[in-house]
């Protein structure tokens, strides 16, 4: 006995509006890609030569790093200037964010206050750090002061959000228990909220330090804040020295890895103990 | 004079939901009162009205001669220091050691700065260590609370309440998260405290059998109303039905026959 032939082909994927629009988008993008490649203004660049040059530059950058215009000591000094800029702005931001973060946590502060602070910090975060630096440069001039104020501003905005969310994750019962024993608000904060959220605060602060470190490099190049960013700017834009640029890159990489290692160690010490 | 006087206590949540409906009872110093009733009956709310963790809608609660509903700020905190509280989920700061958690019970007596910095007097520390030892936790004194078992955590909770030198303990489902063995230790401990120090104890319980065995007075609550107040011996099966609603039925009766005899 044979099964009757199905009258129509069975479609595994039904032709819905969503599927149709995805397919239309993919076809459109494919057509656009083909079109743009055919109409490229290649300015008579030979592709083969260009690719070879590119790899040559990568080789200079990554495989033949060496210093020429600055000494090793000078480079380390500039690296620490940059790290210092990142650290200082992180610490300033963290101190401001700790207190405002408490007032932005819904389990610790009244609703109207958390709404006001959250709205304000959302605005601060929406504007990129670089724009804040340039904004403050209007009043204090381009340089390290503008960089510090601008980066502190954005760090605080970022950390207020991160801290207040960490505070909100605390078990409500713990706060209730301290309130029930007659503890006041500040005592509850420092005896329960801070110990319970310490490792979260620390890891957010480190994340921000990493961001601030890389922002500090960029600020050295663009806002005249000094540090290794400025040396990189000189090596690439002024001396056109890819080998020196490579040396700086490796120095920054080494520093970033050391930072990550230190952060992991510190967090392991604060985290729950394992047996 | 009664230590705790509850008069026509009513609590509304959001204007509509009636959590406590016109509850009146007195508690004499040294009593051990078990409050029973189904989940959501208002037992937890009742305890929290006594130390004003929740605000009271109407009626009066007087503790040791002080009217609670209008207390604010420092006066409210002073009142709270005299009432210890124990919770189902222990509510300890897991990251801190046992003794640090126990000393939290002293915060209400301290100034803000001393409390923030955790500066306790030698006397307070000695007192805390003595209570920890009396509850059999001396070996755990410097352990972090996340390394303790449930029963040990609850004993830390009791120690934190005792270090307040309270006149009364409010216990909100103290054994609901514990295994039977640990539960017995906790209930025996509470009973001991009540007997040896004369601290009044109000304990919310899910388990009728435990309430009948330990409490010397039972308060039954159903849907925010006080439906029984009296000795455990006089609590009839019909009244248990009334407290828990008809569906509880057989299980409770079985338990009652086994334990209350």
Image (spheres, coloured by chain):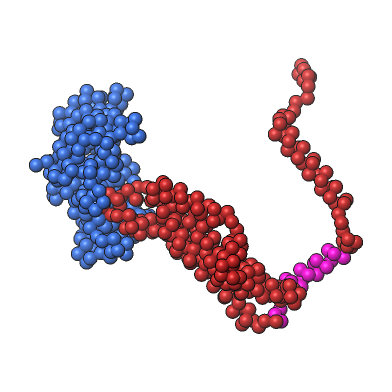
Chain colours: A red, B blue
* A90 is within the stretch colored magenta: no
Above or below — where is B240 with respect to A85? above
Name which residue lies at 50% across and 50% down.
A119
The residue at the point 27 percent across, 33 percent down is: B20
Q: Is residue A233 visible?
A: yes
**In front of the other: A178 or B152:** A178
A183 up-or-down from A246: above or below: above
Q: Quadrant of residue A209?
A: bottom right
- Specify the segment rendered in magenta: A49-68
* B144 or B82, nearer to the observer: B82
Give how far across and how far down residue A190 sits, in percent: 35, 59
Q: How many marks?
A: 0
**Percent x, y of residue B45:** 28, 38
Tell me if B64 is positioned left or right of B137 in this view.
left
Answer left or right for A7 relative to B96.
Answer: right
Q: Quadrant of the N terminus of chain B?
A: top left
Closer-to-camera residue (B101/B191)? B101
**Residue A51 among magenta residues:** yes
Say whether residue A3 is left or right of residue A273.
right
Instruction: From the top left corner, tell me how far across and down residue B105 is, in percent.
Output: 26, 55
Look at 54% across and 60% down and name the residue there.
Answer: A154
Say if A13 sits above or below B76 in the image. Answer: above
Please, which residue is most extreme toward the front here? A139
- Name the image quarter holding the C terminus of chain B: top left
Residue B152 can be seen, yes or no = no
Q: In the rendered view, does B144 fall on the left or right side of B72?
A: right
Magenta region, mostly helix, strand or loop?
helix
Question: Which x, y percent locates residue B220?
Answer: 22, 31
């Amino acid at each position: 006995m044979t099964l009757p032939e199905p009258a129509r082909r069975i479609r595994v994927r039904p032709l819905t509006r969503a599927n149709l629009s995805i397919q239309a988008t993919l076809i459109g993008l494919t057509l656009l890609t083909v079109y743009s490649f055919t109409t490229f203004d290649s300015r008579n660049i030979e592709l083969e030569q260009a690719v070879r040059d590119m790899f040559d530059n990568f080789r200079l950058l990554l495989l033949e790093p060496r210093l020429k215009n600055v000494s090793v000591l000078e480079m380390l000094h500039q690296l620490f200037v940059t790290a210092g800029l990142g650290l200082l702005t992180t610490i300033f931001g963290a101190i401001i964010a700790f207190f405002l973060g408490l007032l932005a946590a819904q389990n610790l502060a009244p609703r109207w206050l958390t709404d006001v602070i959250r709205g304000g910090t959302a605005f601060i975060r929406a504007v990129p750090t670089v724009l804040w630096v340039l904004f403050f440069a209007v009043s204090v001039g381009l340089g390290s002061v503008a960089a510090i104020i601008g980066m502190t501003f954005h760090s605080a905005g970022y950390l207020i959000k991160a801290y207040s969310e960490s505070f909100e994750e605390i078990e409500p019962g713990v706060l209730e228990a301290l309130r029930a024993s007659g503890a006041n608000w500040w005592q509850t904060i420092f005896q329960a909220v801070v110990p319970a959220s310490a490792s979260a605060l620390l890891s957010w602060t480190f994340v921000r330090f990493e961001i601030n470190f890389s922002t500090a490099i960029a600020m050295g190049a663009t806002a005249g804040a000094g540090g290794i960013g400025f040396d990189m700017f000189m090596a690439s834009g002024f001396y056109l020295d890819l080998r020196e640029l490579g040396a700086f890159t490796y120095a920054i990489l080494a520093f970033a890895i050391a930072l990550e290692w230190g952060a992991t160690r510190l967090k392991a010490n604060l985290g729950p103990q394992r047996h | 004079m009664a230590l705790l006087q509850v008069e026509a206590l009513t609590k509304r949540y959001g204007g509509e939901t009636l959590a406590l409906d016109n509850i009146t009872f007195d508690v004499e110093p040294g009593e051990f009162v078990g409050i029973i009733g189904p989940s959501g009956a208002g037992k937890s709310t009742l305890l929290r009205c006594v130390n004003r963790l929740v605000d009271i809608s109407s009626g009066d609660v007087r503790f040791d001669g002080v009217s609670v509903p209008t207390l604010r700020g420092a006066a409210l905190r002073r009142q709270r220091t005299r009432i210890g509280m124990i919770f189902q989920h222990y509510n300890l700061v897991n990251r801190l050691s046992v003794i640090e958690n126990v000393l939290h019970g002293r915060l209400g007596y301290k100034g803000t700065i001393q409390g923030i910095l955790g500066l306790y007097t030698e006397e307070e520390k000695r007192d805390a260590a003595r209570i920890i030892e009396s509850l059999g936790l001396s070996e755990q004194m410097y352990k972090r609370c996340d390394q303790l078992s449930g029963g040990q955590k609850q004993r830390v909770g009791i120690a934190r309440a005792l270090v307040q030198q309270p006149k009364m303990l409010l216990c909100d489902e103290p054994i609901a998260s514990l295994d039977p063995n640990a539960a017995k230790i906790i209930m025996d401990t509470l009973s001991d405290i009540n007997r040896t120090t004369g601290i009044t104890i109000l304990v919310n319980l899910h388990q009728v059998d435990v309430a009948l065995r330990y409490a010397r007075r039972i308060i039954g609550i159903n849907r925010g109303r006080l439906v029984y107040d009296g000795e455990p011996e006089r609590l009839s099966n019909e009244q248990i039905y009334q407290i828990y609603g008809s569906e509880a039925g057989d299980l409770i009766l079985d338990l009652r026959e086994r334990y209350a005899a």
